[in-house]
Amino acid sequence: MSYKQTLVKTLKDHIRPQALKKNNRYKKWEYGYNKEYDMVVISKTGEIGEVIEIQNLKIALPKPSNVHKFKSNTWEHSEYPKVLQRIKSVFDWEEYPVEFKEQWYDYIDSEFNKREEGFWFYNKNVATYITGTHYMYLQWSKIDVGKPEFRESNRLFYIFWEACKADYRSYGMCYLKNRRSGFSFMASGEIVNMATISSDSRFGILSKSGPDAKKMFTDKVVPISVNYPFFFKPIQDGMDRPKTELAYRVPASKFTRKKLETNEQLKELDGLDTTIDWKNTGDNSYDGEKLKLLVHDESGKWERPTNILNNWRVTKTTLRLGSRIIGKCMMGSTSNSLDKGGDNFKKLYYDSDVTRRNRNGQTSSGLYSLFIPMEWNYEGYIDMYGAPVFDTPDKPILDAFGDKIHQGVIEYWQNEVEGLKDDQDGLNEFYRQFPRTESHAFRDEAKQSLFNLTKIYEQIDYNDDISNSSIVSKGSFQWKNGIKDTTVEFIPNNSGRFKVSWVPKLEMQNRMRLKNGIKYPANDHIGAFGCDSYDISGTVDGIGSNGALHGLTKFSMEEAPSNMFFLEYVARPQTAEIFFEDVLMACVFYGMPILSENNKPRLLYHFKRRGYRGYSMNRPDKLYNKLSVTEKEIGGIPNSSMDMKQSHAAAIESYIEKYVGQSEQGCGNMYFSRTLEDWAKFDINNRTLFDASISSGLAIMACNKNLYTPVQQRQVKTINLGIRRYNNKGSRSKII
């Protein structure tokens, strides 16, 4: 089976051909976000060509023009003319005769145009576009191996970054990467590129530690700046290779006392008054400053007590004036294990999802998330055209250095994984360093887990491989025509809070029966829900735990999958009442009962008040006559006793062993990876952190309530009939 790439796709006819042709003719496409077509235009010529989508962000590329063809039919680094190499600064250039300078004006103008608008070239006979930033990186940046090679993955990275710069709603990018992807050099190239064309601006560098930020500055940023051609190099103050600050401004030494005393003619010098520096790692780095670009390297490796989330809340303010975004952040990293700072980076990454925006059109973090799988960017598996070699070829393929590639990167990666199967910690570290999926990138260390981690991770990997977007749908429930207590409909919606993997057929939806004026679910033989609720809308810290709901089927003769989690809801809407109504609508739609913890009783009172007490299950471990007054009134189960906690954990453990991960029948059908990850981290002594585990465990208990029903002992009453009984052992009978 050949590899199917999902990183980028071309959107055919995203723009009506007529509108595209007309706007191109008059060059009316403006650089930036286009609201009409919900896309970001990165063309600076007024004309656009192809519209592509990278991680749900639609990007309009420039229209091809002046496509260059190199001899090799792929990218080639162009030699810098030797006569110009001798010129080290604009001061040297000024000394040359006019005739000489006129010979090179066109060359210099051409380089500036490529820097501004980007560059088109034929790559394997296909017209290929790279942004101006990417051109500067390939042509004019010096890295540890000399000149960078062209890679398709880097081309897409730079296109995405250009879109972040162009989009007025974006603070920049949060890039989840694999090791040795070249991000540090690409970010260093960009900071020099932007700084050398910006006046009165400040540029900053942060990394996982102060020494790391300093090393990036001295070993990457400064050498790139030093090796720029003279026509891109502004007047610089201080040392050629500074340790703390790179300053593009007029040096004070140019105006010497001697020159002033001798009335020597002074030339008017223009400096950019722009600086690049680095800071020590901390929550308040760059606090109170104004930045044009912040490079955030190794942001997934900030270890406690430093916190990338706290730092971003502070540094975000350095990139805006009021509501206007005036600077961008280029953030990129692999992830540490979750308990070593990776959890904060994970939250920041998922808060940067472009499909989830507030009313101002911004993501929760302000950044745009980008993940490029390792197979796109792994050294040794990139062909001479910069394309990844996914599948093992029939014949060897040459790479950019003329070496033969005999194996596909997917096969290589799978072999590495297979070799680490017996070393769970080593395997998880490999996943984090070279992830093929987002869940690989945030794979945690294999600690003392309560449950079978092997089965959990097998299921997560399976879910990633099958691209479960085709199985799991997002959506919302709503009352038909907005009239409560009628029938409920499911509306597919990418911004919906529900994830579902099975929807019952029409005649099975909204099934209920009435008994003494109380509504009861009529599909209770098919499945049940478990819920971890909350009572208070707001929280002191503004965060609070999520409300969680899970639906699970039993074995049944109806047209429903057996023993499958079919619904996941982990969210915290603006008010608790919205959450209660969401839960109620899900129960009504599926016609199934719910088992919820009754220590937060507002949800259960909501059900009772609306006439749905029959949907709320009583605790299965007690007979009805043993229930408390409150338990009889609203149902539910307490979470206080250790016996209950043990039963809850045992229920999850049993389900994992039976229905999760690989078996002789294939892989399980538990498609909700968020819940699987919650199970992997579950701590029975600190249950409040694991909303998904609480609700999913209650769903399992609800579907297997017979296992918890106490056995009622028969009581035999003795009735005295006045007849004496005797013990007839021995020689004499004795009255008992």
Image (cartoon, rainbow, N blue to C red):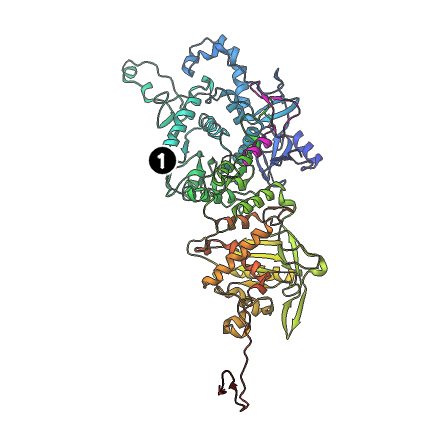
Residue positioned most to the right: 507
Q: Relative to residue 375, is residue 321 depicted above or below?
A: below
Determine crowd level at label 1: few under 14, some 14-19, many 20+ residues with C-alpha closer than 10 A: some
The quadrant in which the N terminus is found is top right
Residue 272 appearing in the image? yes
Examine the structure image and report whether residue 15 is included in the region drawn in magenta: no
Q: Which residues are magenta?
A: 388-417
Q: In which quarter of the view is residue 123 placed?
A: top right
* Number of callouts: 1
- Which secondary structure lies at badge 1? loop
Residue 189's spot in the image, x, y percent?
A: 47, 26
Q: Relative to residue 638, is residue 99 depicted above or below?
A: above
The front one of 17 and 126 is 126
Residue 721's spot in the image, x, y percent?
A: 55, 90
* Left or right of residue 14, residue 716 in this image: left
The front one of 113 and 223 is 223
Residue 151's spot in the image, x, y percent?
A: 56, 26
Name the residue carrying label 1: 280
Examine the structure image and report whether residue 393 is included in the region drawn in magenta: yes
